[in-house]
Amino acid sequence: MSMKDCKKIESKEEETSKDAAVVERDDYMKNSSELVELTKTRLMRAFVEAQDPSSKHLSTVQVLVFIFIRESKGEREGKKTMDSDIIPELESNKTMKDEAEQAVARLHTTTSNEMKSSTQETEEMRRIRQMRVFVERKDAFSKEVDDLMLRRFLRARVLDVEQASDMFLKYLKWRQSFAPNGSTSASEVPNQIAQNKLFSQGSDKRGCPIAVLLGARHFQVKGGLKEFKRYVVYAFDKLCARMPPGQEKFIFIGDLEGWGYSNSDIRAYLGALSILQDYYPERLGKMFIVHVPFVFMTAWKIVSPFIDNKTKEKIVFVVNKMLKSTLLEEIDESQLPEIYGGKLPLVPI
C-alpha cells in the first residue's frame, strides 16, 4: 500500500470520526433539551399546584403547551422565560418552595403508582388469557363467562393461574348442580324469607350495593342448613344483580343488636362463609359488624379460624359510639339506613 493510499484512509477515518462526533453532540443536545424540558415541566407543575390545587388535573402535555407558549412569547417580546421567572420567586418564598417540593414528590409518587397499576393490569390481562384457554378446554360453560369473573378468581388466588383455574372449575361444577336453572327462586327458601332478617337498599360512595342483616332474627328453622345455603345464594345473587356497570362488590352490615345464644348457628355461619369465599370471591367489599354483644365473641372464636386473611381484612367491628361516623366514611347519609341515622328505610331483599 502506497503512502498516498494511507493518507486517503486516514482522511476518511478523520471524516468518519467528525461525523460520529457531530451525531454524538446532537444526541447529547437532544437528551439535554429533553431533560431541561422535563425539569421545567415538573417545576411548573409544582409551582401551579402550590398556587391552585385544581391544576393537578392538568396533563403533562397541557403543561408542555403552556411552557412552549410562554417561552415563544418571551422570545418575541424579550420577556423572562420560565427559568428566570419562577426559580427566583420560589427561592424567595420558602413556604411556596416547600409546597412546590412536596408537589414534585407527589408527582413522582403518582407517576410511580400509575406505572405500577398499568403493569399490574397488563399482567392480569395476560394471565386472564392463559386462564381462559385452560378452563375452556376443561369445561365448555367457561366460554359463557366474562373476563371480570375470571379476574375475580385470579385475584382470589394472587394471580396463580393454576390455582384460580381449579377454583373456577369447581365453582362451575357446583353452580350447575346447585342451581341448574341458573338461579334460586324465593319459593325455594320460604322459611328463611319469613324471618325477615335481610335487607338491601342504597349504595356506598363507590356504588357498591348495601345489605343489612339483623342477626337476632335468625333461628334454626324447618328446612335446616340446606335451605339456609340456598337462601345465602339467593341473597348474593340479588346483591350482584343490583351492581351498576363497572362495580363488582357489595357492602354488608351485620347488626347483632339483641343477639343471644338462641340465635347462634355455627353450621350456618360456616356454610355462608364457605359459599362467599369459594364461589363468590372478591365480591365482598367490606363487612361492618355492629352492636356486637360480648356473648357473640364465643361464636366468633369458633368461626374466625375458617376465614381467609383477605376476607378478614374486610371485616370491621364497629364501636357503638363510633357507629354513624364510621359508616359515613363509606356511605353518604342519603344512602344510609334510617336505623343508623340515615335517610333510607329497610327494604327486605
Image (cartoon, helix red, strand yellow):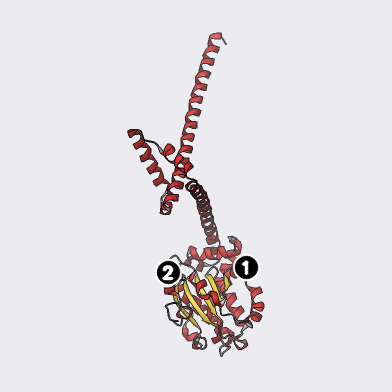
Q: Position of residue 14 (x, y in %)?
A: 52, 18
**Residue plotted at (47% across, 31% down):** 29
Evaluate whether residue 192 shows in this view: yes
Which residue reaches farthest top?
3
Residue sitting at 33 percent across and 34 percent down? Answer: 77
Mark 2, residue position: 244
Q: Report the residue marked by disc 1.
A: 309
160 sits left or right of 146 in the view: right
Residue 113, x across and y down, in percent: 52, 53
Q: Where does the N terminus fall, quadrant-wise?
A: top right
Residue type of the residue flagged with mark 1 = Asn
Quadrant of res 223: bottom right
Task: Determine whether 245 is above or below 81 in the image.
Answer: below
In percent of width and height, residue 287 lies at: 54, 73
Q: Which secondary structure, mark 1?
A: helix
Crowd band around label 2 with a 10 angstrom C-alpha radius: few (<14), some (14–19), many (20+): few
x%, y% of residue 171? 56, 71
Query: Is the residue 92 above or below the residue 57 in the image?
Result: above
